[in-house]
Amino acid sequence: MNLRISDDGHSVLLDNKIIYTSKEYEMSKRFFGTINGKIIIRLFRDNNNIICIDKDGTLIWEVEDTTEDHRDPYQAFDIRNNFIFASVTLANVKIDPHTGKILEQTYAK
């Protein structure tokens, strides 16, 4: 399986076939990965900027915001131990890979 972001940053390719395209937002080639057969992508947009798609390109979820008052974009994420760990201004979160919901949140001191 060959999975990558297109050169222009707007499409996900699986075995050189486009499976998902975002005309409005560019995708991060650095923060992009797979977990449990799902594809996790960070978009360059203001909030809810981590998304999950399946191998057919169907959107499964968008990550939830850390709080209603705090809608900064997630800056990075890492996939470890079957969870997604992401950072946002002054906070780190653990995300459920099946739903995009925040399971744990810690704030920087």
Image (tube, rainbow, N blue to C red):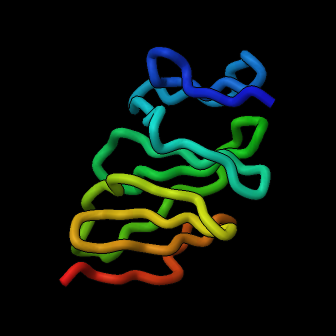
Q: Quadrant of residue 20?
A: top right
The total number of labels drawn is 0
Q: Quadrant of residue 56?
A: top right
Residue 90 screen position, x and y as percent: 22, 72
* Residue lying at the far front of the rendered structure: 80
Residue 5 screen position, x and y as percent: 56, 26
Residue 76 screen position, x and y as percent: 39, 53
User: For the point 68% across and 67% down, which residue is it?
Assistant: 82
Q: On the rendered image, what quadrant is the C terminus found in?
A: bottom left
Residue 91 screen position, x and y as percent: 29, 73
Q: On the rendered image, what quadrant is the N terminus found in?
A: top right
In the image: residue 88, left or right of residue 49 = left
User: For the point 54% across and 42% down, which residue is it?
Assistant: 32
Q: Could you say which is closer to the camera, residue 22 or residue 75?
A: 75
Q: Quadrant of residue 69?
A: bottom left
In the image: residue 70, left or right of residue 79 = left
User: For the point 69% across and 30% down, which residue is it?
Assistant: 3
Query: Vertically, is 70 above or below 26?
Result: below
In the image: residue 15, left or right of residue 11 = right
User: For the point 49% across and 15% down, which residue is it?
Assistant: 7
